[in-house]
């Protein structure tokens, strides 16, 4: 064979590289768990902190919003100062913010602590993915490593309720945050010993104006969409969205003029990149949003303990892990777009099956829906992330991974906000039309607004009055969950259309 013309095989990963992947994987698991670990703790902290309905939504989704708002900054910063260095800084900050969240004594303090957790968490995802991009140079090995990375994120997000359930069985709700502390301390010890350092040696100075613009644009758009989902197109929501679009336009214009931009807009010339980002947002909207309400359904409608509810949702994490790990093998035999399409069809059927839950209140129906949803959505992250890493040059891996992860976080946080607002509005409308005579107005009014308040109110009433209140609240919430599941069907089918029309040649 003529070696001069034969393709050069990329260097293969060493045992040390695979150990480095294991070091990277564990904090990713914990980072993702923080998105959902509060799902089962919501009824407990609601009793302790007495947050309003709006504050409760902010407690749940401010973490994802702050991650999404600062990811691009952190990805670019990692390219400049070093991916390992940023990862270790983020791990230390994450541990400190976790302690603050555990010590919160008011809704406002918990919201602030969760926001700080989101900023710290934003350093972890782009740093770990860009390290994988630089460590694993062989395409097959890199695809497998990305599958492991995605499996950790997916499993962490879905195992969060199980871990939360176990902790809540023995400790107060604040303890759900402390589980992250020993993991981050372990990363601080093992990281300098096992993780290599990578940075863009030719990177210029970080442009502070661009950094501020990216954060303001992201957070303003997210806040505006949240307010729109909660209250409709009021002046506050319109102003926030307009501000986000205006600052976003200034950000893009500035990137075109800079010699060393924060985001390389040339990446977006690839036809598959925009499609991959859109698929991430639409797929994650359903995946993250629906599990908040499944957890509430198990506890507040079926009367399960946090431990029982966590055990019933645990298979979702296993399915995500299996699907993510199997995807690299599947794409060797079939086109990625075909694997992705089959998964999205299966997920759509799972969401559709979930709409039957209100009529049957059947755990087999719920478990069948969860398994179909999780197995169907599990290939999304591996396929779209691998595409992003193939498009991006190695020296821009941090920024590219931040763009990819932003779409995931934005989709998940948007799902919690939009579906949360849809469920809340549907519940209020259904409860407003139900007559419940004999219940004092000061108790009935909050019960008509949220299922949590209805459960608290029922515990204060004689059984003769509590029973009809529980029945009405459970029926209203089941109907609201049906509507949320139908919205997820629509979002997943939209992702399928984008995949078939835009990724066929990617």
Image (cartoon, rainbow, N blue to C red):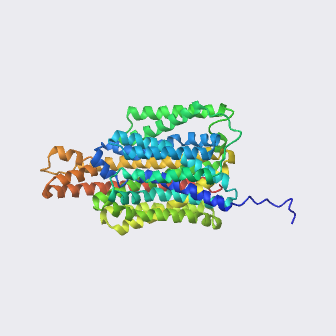
Question: Residue 103, how many percent across, how many down?
Answer: 36, 44
Residue 275 in sight from this viewpoint = no
- Quadrant of residue 342 within the rendered picture: bottom right
- Give me the residue at 80% from left, 60% from top: 7
Question: Residue 41, how many percent across, how many down?
Answer: 34, 53
Question: Residue 68, how many percent across, how many down?
Answer: 50, 43
- Give me the residue at 41% from left, 49% from top: 416
The quarter of the rendered structure image containing the C terminus is: bottom right
Above or below, 360 relative to 215? below
- Quadrant of residue 72 within the rendered picture: top right
- Observer-nearest of 311 and 68: 311
Q: Residue furthest bottom?
A: 364
The quarter of the rendered structure image containing the N terminus is: bottom right
How many numbered marks are there?
A: 0
Above or below, 378 relative to 220? below
Question: Residue 293, how many percent across, how many down?
Answer: 36, 55
């Amino acid at each position: 064979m003529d070696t001069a013309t034969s393709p050069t095989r990329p260097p293969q990963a060493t045992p040390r590289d695979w150990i480095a992947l294991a070091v990277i994987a564990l904090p990713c698991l914990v980072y993702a768990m923080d998105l959902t670990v509060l799902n089962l703790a919501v009824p407990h902290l609601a009793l302790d902190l007495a947050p309003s309905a709006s504050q409760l939504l902010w407690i749940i989704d401010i973490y994802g919003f702050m991650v999404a708002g600062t990811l691009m900054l952190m990805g670019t910063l990692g390219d400049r100062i070093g991916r390992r260095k940023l990862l270790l800084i983020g791990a230390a900050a994450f541990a400190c913010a976790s302690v603050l969240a555990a010590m919160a004594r008011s809704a406002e303090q918990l919201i602030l602590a969760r926001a700080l957790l989101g900023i710290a968490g934003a350093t972890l995802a782009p740093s770990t993915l860009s390290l994988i991009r630089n460590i694993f140079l062989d395409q097959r090995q890199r695809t497998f490593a990305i599958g492991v990375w995605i499996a950790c994120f997916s499993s962490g997000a879905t195992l969060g309720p199980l871990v939360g359930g176990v902790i809540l069985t023995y400790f107060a709700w604040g303890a759900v945050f402390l589980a992250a502390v020993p993991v981050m301390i372990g990363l601080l010890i093992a990281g300098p010993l096992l993780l290599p350092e990578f940075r863009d040696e030719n990177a210029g100075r970080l442009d502070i104006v661009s950094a501020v613009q990216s954060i303001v644009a992201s957070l303003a758009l997210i806040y505006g969409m949240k307010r729109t989902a909660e209250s409709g197109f009021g002046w506050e929501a319109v102003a926030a969205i307009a501000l986000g679009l205006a600052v976003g336009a200034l950000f893009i214009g500035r990137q075109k003029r800079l010699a060393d931009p924060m985001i390389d807009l040339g990446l977006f010339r690839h036809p598959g990149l925009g499609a991959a980002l859109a698929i991430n947002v639409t797929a994650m909207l359903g995946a993250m949003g629906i599990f908040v309400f499944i957890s509430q359904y198990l506890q507040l409608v079926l009367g399960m303990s946090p431990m029982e509810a966590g055990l019933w949702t645990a298979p979702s994490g296993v399915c995500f892990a299996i699907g993510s790990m199997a995807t690299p093998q599947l794409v060797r035999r079939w086109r990625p777009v075909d694997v992705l399409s089959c998964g999205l069809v299966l997920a759509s059927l799972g969401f559709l099956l979930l709409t039957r839950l209100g009529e049957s209140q059947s755990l087999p129906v719920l478990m069948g829906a969860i398994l179909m949803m999780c197995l169907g959505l599990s290939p999304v992250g591996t396929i779209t992330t691998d595409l992003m890493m193939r498009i991006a040059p190695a020296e821009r891996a941090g920024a590219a991974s931040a763009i990819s992860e932003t779409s995931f976080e934005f989709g998940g946080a948007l799902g919690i906000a939009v579906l949360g607002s849809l469920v809340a509005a549907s519940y209020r409308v259904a409860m407003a039309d139900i007559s419940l005579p004999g219940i004092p107005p000061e108790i009935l009014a909050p019960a008509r607004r949220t299922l949590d308040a209805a459960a608290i109110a029922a515990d204060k009433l004689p059984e003769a009055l509590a029973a009809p209140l529980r029945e009405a609240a459970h029926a209203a919430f089941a109907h609201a969950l049906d509507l949320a599941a139908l919205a997820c069907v629509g979002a997943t089918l939209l992702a399928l259309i984008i995949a078939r029309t835009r990724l066929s040649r990617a």
